[in-house]
Amino acid sequence: MSKPKLISFKVCPFVQRSVILLKEKNVDYDIEFIDVYNPPEWFLKLSPTGKVPILVVDDTVIFESAVIGEYLEEVYSPALHPSNPVTKAQNRAWMEYTSPLYMGFFGVIMAQDQDAVDVASEEMDKNLAGLANAKTHNPWFNGDDFSMVDIAVAPFFVRAAFAKKHVGIDFLAKHADLQAWSEQVLARQSVIDSTVEGFDEMMLKMMKAKNSFLLNSFS
Ligand SMILES: N[C@@H](CCC(=O)N[C@@H](CS)C(=O)NCC(=O)O)C(=O)O
């Protein structure tokens, strides 16, 4: 089997999940960065959805970050899913649960006025309350074992820290348990290494290009 190759857009949270997993499993992989909003022709031929991430394995394209994750989990050790089938199913459900947090995050930071910020923040808060209820173990979602659920939410914690620092929005303020979880996750080496250099600057540039209300009003 040749080295898997990940096609990435630098600030994509779904790509970041795949990168964390590759690093946790110490996989030797290649990575190629594209501008997914101005994609090269070769990428459009490869990606059925036109989205990143895709993982190319021996000329075969695997798409959808959750599926890439399950593939990596199946092929490379150490296992990051629990072995009990019920717990594993539950973990997969909570991984899925975290995906709307990313749309919510963009909804807030790219909002064009205060009303849109409030609507998106309220929705985000409901999702976070649900996640906080489900987080009954420490330090990780399943207790002592770092898992795929911790990876699924990691890019959100990276983005929540960005929002707190640059536009004064603290998504985790009402959720002390999530705050503690976030601190653990952000200190994890694979998560640190998965965040591209210049991440904050790229995000700020995107916000400026979209005329973000929060960026314009934060001083
Ligand atoms: N469900 C997909 C979502 C991936 C996704 O939305 N990727 C964004 C970048 S973060 C993308 O490629 N957008 C390009 C487009 O929508 O044309 C996954 O989990 O892989």
Image (cartoon, rainbow, N blue to C red):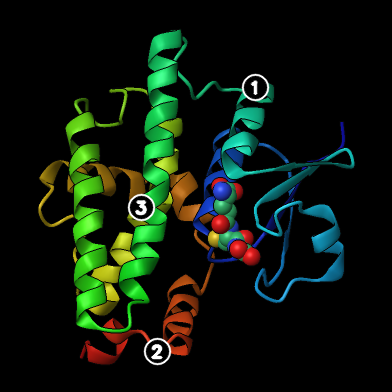
Q: Is residue 35 toward the left or the right of residue 128 in the image? A: right
Q: Identify the amino acid type marked 3.
A: Leu
> Which residue bears the numbered disc 1?
74
Judge left or right: residue 32 versus residue 219: right
Splitting the image into four quadrants, where does ligand 1 fall? Answer: bottom right
Q: Earlier in the sequence, mark 1 or mark 3?
A: 1
Q: Residue 157 in the image: state x and y as whole percent.
A: 33, 53
Residue displayed at 38% across by 21% down: 90
Among the 4 quarters of the image, the one containing residue 208: bottom left
SS class, disc 3: helix
Residue 60 visible in the shown view: yes
Residue marked by disc 3: 101
Tell me the amino acid under the disc marked 1: Glu
Q: Is residue 202 above or below residue 75?
A: below
Q: Residue at x 22, y 87 (%)?
A: 218
Image quarter of residue 153? top left
Q: CA distance from mark 2 to mark 3?
A: 21 Å
Decide if ligand 1 comes within 8 Å of the CB at mark 3. no
C-alpha separation, residue under disc 2 versus residue under disc 1: 43 Å
Q: Earlier in the sequence, mark 2 or mark 1?
A: 1
- The kind of residue tagged 2 is Asn
Q: Is residue 26 visible?
A: no
Is 145 placed above or below 27 here? above
User: Which badge, 2 or 3, is on the more N-terminal residue?
Assistant: 3
